[in-house]
Image (cartoon, grey):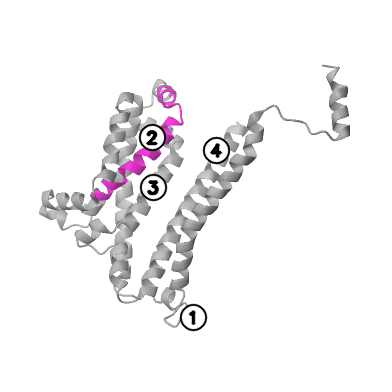
Amino acid sequence: MAALIPEIASEELLGVPRVESDPQRRRRPRIRFWRGIVLFFAGVYFLIPIYAGLRFSLQNDAGQFSLYAVRAIPSQVGFSAAFFLSLRLAAVTTVLTMVLMVPTATYVHLKLPRMRRVLDFVTILPIVIPPIVLILGVLHAAPLWLRSSPYLLSLIYVILALPFVYRSLDAGLSAIDLKTLVEASRSLGGKWVSTLLHVILPNIRAAMLSATVLTIALVLGEFTMASLDLWTTLPVWIYQFQQTDGHIATAVSMFSLIGTWVLLTVIVSVDRSQSRRSRRRTGTL
């Protein structure tokens, strides 16, 4: 080992480049380079339509910059009713989905791990079945009092959100040592409900937040079922009003998209701040 030191020093003095023996270090720049290329083309693919929509919504009929479309949104007929209906449906759908899926996914992870493949298959069916087939079947089978309520859409949206919600919760539950946490809580006298509320839910908070954002985005962007059920939600109102004024309809679409992004950013930032506080508390303890 001592004999190699002069050779290494002489190579550095002569300017001879040293060859790295670890192949992973040489591959890292290439991986980062290709990641940058993929992210660049993905950003271009998504940002160009958004830029075109924003530019069209901020112009008048003469092609000049104008904010009349943005200012005229609240005063349009039917906008407030459609907006608040979509918000109510989003809230009800999120609550129903979490109440249904969180205990189910937790129980499958704890007691029935072999059923995870079956649950994966069952939750993927809403993507396979066309929405128009699903809504027509529900409208023919549902009772009259339920068909006359807009919250029938919330029940259908729960089915549509299952693929996204279950996979988010499944990833969150797989990332923690669920059995150890539950056994520790039960050994200390905790009941199942208290274990779920005070032990499991805080550990899968990030998964629940991501599932919530996906559910809200799905409800605020769904058009087919609301249109066939004859309820004017925000996407249906945008489609109907587009025939009257395309600038205002495009402005509403852009604001709904930006609002979803802002909501996602706020939720992620809140989750990160809470996780940092919890880490600081555990560090001080």
Task: In the rendered view, tell whether residue 14 sits above or below residue 33.
Answer: above
Which residue carries the number 1 mark? Answer: 64
Check disc 1 and give the amino acid type.
Answer: Gln
Disc 2 crowd rating (10 Å Cα; few below 14, some 14-19, many 20+) is many
Q: Secondary structure at mark 3?
A: helix
Q: Quadrant of the C terminus?
A: top right
Q: Is residue 275 visible?
A: yes
Q: Mark 1 or mark 2, which has the lower sequence index?
A: 1
Residue 178 forms part of the magenta stretch: yes
Q: Residue at x 31, y 38 (%)?
A: 101
Give the magenta-colored segment's residue range.
156-184
Residue 12 is left or right of residue 200, and the answer is right
The tag earlier along the polypeptide, 3 or 4, is 3
Q: Give percent across and percent down for residue 215.
A: 35, 49
Q: Between disc 3 and disc 1, whose residue precedes?
A: 1
Question: Which residue carries the number 3 mark?
Answer: 212
Q: Which of labels 1 and 2 is toward the front?
A: 1
Disc 4 residue type (three-letter): Ser
Is residue 116 part of the magenta span, yes or no? Answer: no
Residue 170 badge: 2
Q: Is residue 74 visible?
A: no
Q: Residue furthest bottom?
A: 62
Badge 2 marks a residue whose secondary structure is: helix
Q: Tell me, yes or no, whether the two marked residues, 1 and 4, touch with CB atoms within 8 Å.
A: no
